[in-house]
Amino acid sequence: MRRDYFELAVEHIDWVDTGDQPEKPHVYIDFHGPEDLLRERLTGSGDDLLDASETDVAFRLQGDHESDPDAAGVVGVTNRITGDFVLELNEDAEDVLTFIRAAREYGRAAGDDGRYRVEIDVDGEPLVAYEKETFLVYDADGNLLRRESLIPSGVEL
């Protein structure tokens, strides 16, 4: 599936810098392509759409985000059971890392409530929504960056 079929928007991340009341960060991924293709990738072994426990969200850097302020990367949602990519889209590293920081801070403030919400839409119409607690970040060589990742306490990788 083409990366340019997707648009990503976020909400509820500014409170971290302004000191306002914590709000759960939301990421909206809007798909503008053949709906059947996306539905097929979001369908599990049965005919049901994957649920949150059957998906993983990760970010793979394409450069060094510490030395390059314009570093970019790829956000990916995968099927946890098969390992297949559901979708991928290009994003600026700084934007994704800011989102992860807000999700981390929200998790600290809210306790066990999900740390962020992912909604996947088709042309603005909601298709699936997931409450997630993990968001893994990898460097350009595929090494996990634990410090930048969102990993709930007690989770062993």
Image (cartoon, helix red, strand yellow):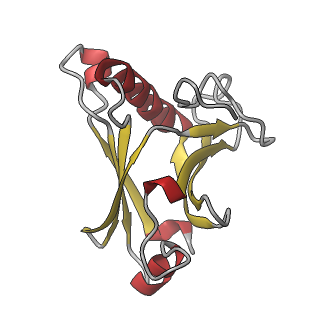
Q: Is residue 71 above or below residue 146?
A: below
For residue 102, side relative to residue 91 (left or right) = left
Residue 61 in the image, given as x and y percentages of width and height: 66, 41
For residue 125, side relative to residue 130 (left or right) = left
Residue depicted at 36% across the width and 29% down the height: 112
Residue depicted at 42% across the width and 34% down the height: 99
Q: Is residue 86 above or below residue 10?
A: below
Q: Residue furthest top?
A: 19
Q: Residue furthest right?
A: 141
- Quadrant location, the N terminus: bottom right
Q: Which one is nearer the viewer's eye here, 37 or 63?
A: 37
Residue depicted at 40% across the width and 30% down the height: 103
Residue depicted at 19% across the width and 18% down the height: 20
Q: Please give the count of numbered marks on the rendered protein.
A: 0
Q: Is residue 35 above or below residue 19?
A: below
Residue 58 in the image, given as x and y percentages of width and height: 58, 46
Residue 10 in the image, given as x and y percentages of width and height: 33, 44
Residue 55 in the image, given as x and y percentages of width and height: 53, 57
- Quadrant location, the C terminus: top right
Q: Residue furthest left?
A: 21
Res 49 quadrant in image: bottom left
Q: Which one is nearer the viewer's eye here, 14 or 80?
A: 80
